[in-house]
Amino acid sequence: MSAGRRALACWAAAVLLVATAMAAEPVRIASPGEEPIRIGSPEKEPIRIGSKRFTESYVLGEILRETAERAGIGAVHRQGLGNTGILEQALASGEIDVYPEYTGTIVRELLKREGRPSLDELNAWLAPRGLKAAVPLGFDNRYALALREADAERLGLQKMSDLRKPEAAALRWGLSHEFLARADGWPALRGAYGLKAAPRGLDHGLAYGALAAAQIDVTDVYSTDAQIGRLGLRVLADDLGFFPKYEAVLLMRRELDAAPFAVLAGRIGERRMIDLNAQAEVDRRSFASIAQGFVASLPPTAGADARPAAAPAEAGHGFAARLFAPDLARLVGQHLLLVFGSVLAAVLLGVPLGVWAWARPRVAPWMLGMVGVVQTLPSLALLTFLIAALDHIGAVPALIALFLYALLPIVRNAHAGLVGVPAALAQAGLSLGLRPLQVLRHVQLPLAMPTLLAGVKTAAVINVGTATIAAFVGAGGLGERIVAGLALNDTQAMLAGAVPAAVLALFVQWSFDALERQVAPRRQSSRWTG
């Protein structure tokens, strides 16, 4: 088998694995006349739990997964899917079944309403969307604004309206991206208090580090954030009562049975939630071990093993322990499937496009220009567009985005490789009685193969890095560690995802280099002389 065919066989095997993995994802469709089976029941697919990209949501998502499994129900946690809008869309499309949310967010951000409804009233509002809120967890996680205690004391700032004082005009604001865009966030808060600040956007997990380093002076916080007390911050009073109550509840699809989670109702007070957050942000414990320790302290549920499980021991906090954690093989496998699946699809389309552009010189500039435009699109913007267009999160939009990014180097190099083949060689083949397609297959494409492989290599190496963004839409991969590290402002956690991704990029580079060395001698031996 030639080197080119061996390469194609490798790509085909990778895509087959991607298709198998995607096909294995359960679909919640009942046959006509069949009685619906409760989501999460042992005879059906597991409950799919989502979470946002901040510490508390990660911890609560793991608590839900552990609670369901303790009740004998399968569950998977799709961590850090994004902001409120993405989670709502994931619920509506059936990508997830439940995630932890807050009543104020549901009322203002999702429903675009005002007031403080009861749980029954809230569910009446949610019913047309096929959703419901259940299982109040027992704490209220309010939004607030905070700054360093020394600055607050020096400027005499006690409440939010004090931020209108001339002395506060020089304060540097850094607000989380979601808060800047939310209906119950900065736009409305600025109007309510008459604030004139021009805040910069940053990830919520990085805001506390920026405050500690005096890079910003004011940020939005959650009242259960563990870092408030640790850094000695002053939380300004909401003297106009702008923020609604943010009682933690479970937002779920209406058909989901909430009974397995009922044991959590009222079990997590504000102090307990602050402690759970601190275990992640200060003690650097994994979300899974925090959840297991908490659920082990709960009373046994009906049908569950009455013997409480012991809290798991941490495998270690060092970088090596995080790097080689048990999830490494799963994340690397997901990452490889995203990369190879998208690049194979780009090869199958990009090579014919490159050949067509070469055969139609007038079309070439337009073709290369169109595929080049895709490279200018920000990756997160492209993912957002695909999620909205497909009404889907997970591997599908991630694979499409990576496929689009891989097109340019493959189309461009296929075209350049064929342009670089001397026209005299094609003419010689035609003189020997070969048809044009035979000349293309047996003369021109083999001679263009090194340039073509260089384009495929470039696409694959680039996609190894770009695939880390797939974690933002629940497609998995090594980006999961990076996103979680951002939420915790944990450099080691981020490096535990970045280092394997870098090693993987080097491995792909070296593999293609070896393949190119095999192809180059074949090109030389097949070069015509005359």
Image: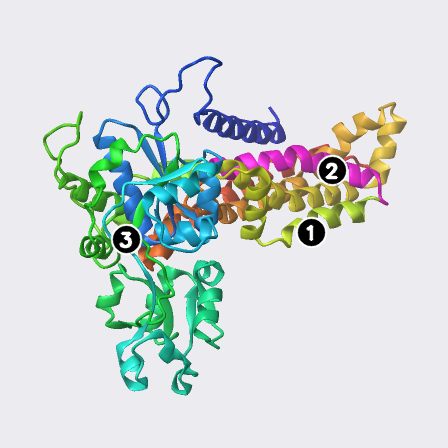
> Which element carries disc 1, helix, strand or loop?
helix
Rounded to the nearest whole Å, what is the CA distance between mark 2 and mark 1?
A: 15 Å
- Where does label 2 land, which residue? 353
From where the camera sits, is residue 107 visible? yes
Rounded to the nearest whole Å, what is the CA distance between mark 3 and mark 2?
A: 45 Å
Is 313 within the magenta?
A: no
Viewer-side label of 3, 1: 1
Q: Are marks 3 and 2 in contact (CB under 8 Å)?
A: no
The answer to whether 330 is drawn above or below residue 155 in the figure is above
Label drawn at residue 495: none
Q: Are marks 2 and 1 in contact (CB under 8 Å)?
A: no
- Where does label 1 land, which residue? 373
Viewer-side label of 2, 1: 1
- Where does label 3 land, which residue? 319
The answer to whether 466 is drawn above or below residue 298 in the figure is below
Q: Residues within 10 Å of mark 3 (few under 14, many from 20)?
A: some
| Magenta span: chief secondary structure | helix
In the image, farthest residue toward the left: 307
Task: Please provide the residue range marked out in magenta.
Answer: 336-362
The answer to whether 248 is drawn above or below residue 292 in the figure is below
